[in-house]
Image (cartoon, coloured by chain):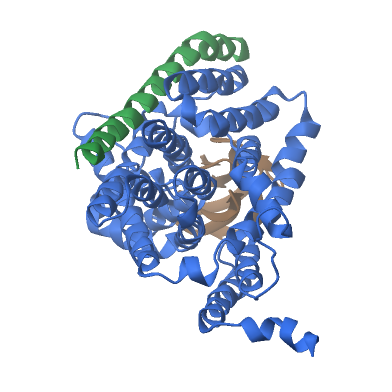
Chain colours: A brown, B green, C blue
């Protein structure tokens, strides 16, 4: 089952630190969201493999948008 | 000293009253404009 | 030779040289540490220039910088124009989503009034004490606005104190925040607010302007411009006005503001022991404001199911958005998956409004 990684705070995608197929552990850094000129790290909610990334660098994201899917 | 105390009391209560009224205004604004649009968006 | 007699060098005093050091220090901090560079750079330069003798730059009726000061600040034009830009820059969404956090912005004004009271007991006049207290609101343009109305002789010192402490927010606030909260409290994750409709955001500046100005008419110059700027933003039909208010216009008036504030600080006015008190009292005001916001958040938690992370209370200090960023950082130290930034913006913006109301009340009683 895939777990959705949700946007924790609205902003724009500053940098994506993983690629599709990467294996991640819970609390690994996935990407950076810039809000109010501050870079905020988003962490993996669970262990698994990144199966899909739905955003790209520079995208504006709203609260609770889906950023990526992680397959456990 | 009397005058300073008066400013102190008026000031603090004034700020809280001012923002409390603004709080009420936000709530009314939400009732008037918030739900209606939320429904439309659904 | 007349040339030698007219040289500024002949009229130089040690006090002036000391003021150069202060001005150059501000320039240095602005450049190397990037402490509020947009303001401290022109302020620092203004201090140096005004302490060069025989320039008559601040001579009433004829000096160049005096004209900037007189028409810009004494005529109350520049601070309201800055507020116009701030309004255009501000997204009230976080405040509208969680309106109860507005009270944290009110609590942070407690520091203003406590400091006012202490300054008065130390021998400052009521008007001077009010101007010193408002430093605790951490709002530069409001401090300058109030000082120009109540105590112009303190304007330079209070403005520099306010802007310096705003730059030092990341150092002043965290120790107080950690002292007053437990680890468990810092880990509280707050429930996301509801979605705010664009119509609500459009109506807010209109409603807020009317409500606040009806209550505190003396706050009108700042609040009216603040809400007008926000109406530009949210109406979405005057993108040109929105854009120019938050960029070009704000940048232009910032130049005149910084330069003329700096130029008010000549050695005679600035090098007095009162100024040292102003800096201490300003810092004290800042600390009390930070603490009172946190304490109110903890108090509110006694009555509510939906807990507030008390760190957010510290953002009632209106240094936007520095205070909110500090809240995010301190929160993330306790729990790296806790994102408090947007929650902190609510009290942060409420703090701006609260400080303007506080200034308006001071003016209506003391002017």
- Residue in the picture at 55% in, 66% down: C35
* Whether residue C25 is situated above or below residue C128 in the rendered picture: below
Which corner quadrant holds the C terminus of chain B? top right
The answer to whether residue C181 of the structure is visible from this angle is: no
Q: Position of residue C91 (x, y in %)?
A: 58, 34
The answer to whether residue B31 of the structure is visible from this angle is: yes
Q: How many numbered marks, from 0 up? A: 0
Q: Position of residue C76 (x, y in %)?
A: 60, 40
Q: Position of residue A7 (x, y in %)?
A: 55, 41
Q: Position of residue C323 (x, y in %)?
A: 45, 51
For residue C230, what is the image quadrant?
top right
**Outermost residue toward the bottom?**
C1
For residue C354, what is the image quadrant?
top left
- Residue in the picture at 54% in, 65% down: C265
Q: Nearer the viewer, residue A53 or C268?
A: C268
* Whether residue C233 is situated above or below residue C324 in the rendered picture: above
- Residue in the picture at 61% in, 35% down: C87
- C52 sits left or right of C248 in the view: left
- C339 sits left or right of C202 in the view: left
For residue C92, what is the image quadrant?
top right
* Whether residue B24 is situated above or below residue A47 in the rendered picture: above
- A72 sits left or right of C79 in the view: left
* Whether residue C124 is situated above or below residue C9 in the rendered picture: above
């Amino acid at each position: 089952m895939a777990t959705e990684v949700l946007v924790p705070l609205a902003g724009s995608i500053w940098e994506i630190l993983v690629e599709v197929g990467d294996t991640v552990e819970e609390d690994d850094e996935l990407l950076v969201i810039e809000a109010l000129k501050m870079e905020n790290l988003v962490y993996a909610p669970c262990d698994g493999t990144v199966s899909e990334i739905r955003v790209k660098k520079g995208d504006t994201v709203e609260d609770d948008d889906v950023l990526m899917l992680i397959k456990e | 000293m009397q005058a300073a105390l008066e400013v102190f009391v008026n000031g603090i209560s004034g700020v809280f009253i001012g923002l409390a009224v603004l709080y009420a205004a936000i709530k009314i604004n939400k009732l008037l404009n918030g739900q209606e649009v939320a429904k439309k968006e659904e | 030779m007349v040339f030698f007699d007219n040289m500024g060098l002949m009229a130089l005093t040690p006090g002036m040289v000391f003021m150069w050091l202060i001005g150059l220090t501000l320039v240095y901090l602005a450049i190397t540490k990037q402490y509020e560079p947009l303001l401290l750079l022109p302020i620092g330069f203004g201090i140096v220039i005004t302490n060069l003798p025989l320039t008559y730059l601040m001579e009433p009726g004829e000096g160049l910088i005096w004209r900037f000061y007189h028409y810009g600040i004494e005529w109350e034009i520049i601070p309201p124009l800055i507020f116009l830009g701030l309004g255009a820059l501000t997204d009230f969404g976080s405040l509208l989503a969680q309106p109860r956090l507005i009270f944290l912005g009110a609590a942070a004004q407690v520091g203003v009034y406590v400091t006012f009271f202490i300054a008065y007991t130390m021998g400052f006049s009521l008007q001077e004490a009010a101007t010193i207290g408002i430093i605790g609101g951490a709002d530069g343009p409001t401090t300058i606005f109030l000082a120009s109305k109540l105590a112009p002789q303190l304007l330079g010192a209070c403005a520099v104190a306010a802007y310096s402490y705003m730059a030092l927010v990341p150092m002043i606030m965290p120790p107080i925040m950690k002292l007053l909260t437990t680890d468990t409290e810092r880990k509280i994750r707050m429930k996301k607010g509801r979605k705010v409709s664009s119509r609500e955001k459009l109506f807010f500046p209109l409603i807020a302007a009317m409500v606040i100005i009806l209550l505190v008419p003396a706050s009108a110059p700042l609040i009216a411009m603040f809400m007008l700027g926000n109406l530009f933003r949210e109406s979405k039909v005057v993108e040109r006005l929105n854009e120019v208010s938050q960029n070009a216009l704000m940048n232009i008036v910032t130049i005149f503001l910084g330069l003329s504030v700096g130029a008010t600080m000549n050695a005679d006015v600035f090098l007095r022991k009162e100024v040292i008190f102003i800096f201490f009292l300003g810092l004290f005001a800042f600390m009390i404001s930070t603490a009172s916001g946190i304490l109110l958040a903890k108090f509110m938690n006694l009555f509510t199911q939906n807990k507030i992370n008390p760190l957010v209370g510290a953002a009632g200090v209106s240094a936007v958005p520095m205070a909110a960023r500090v809240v995010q950082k301190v929160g993330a130290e306790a729990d790296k998956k806790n994102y408090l930034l947007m929650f902190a913006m609510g009290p942060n913006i409420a703090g701006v409004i609260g400080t303007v109301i506080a200034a308006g009340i001071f003016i209506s009683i003391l002017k």
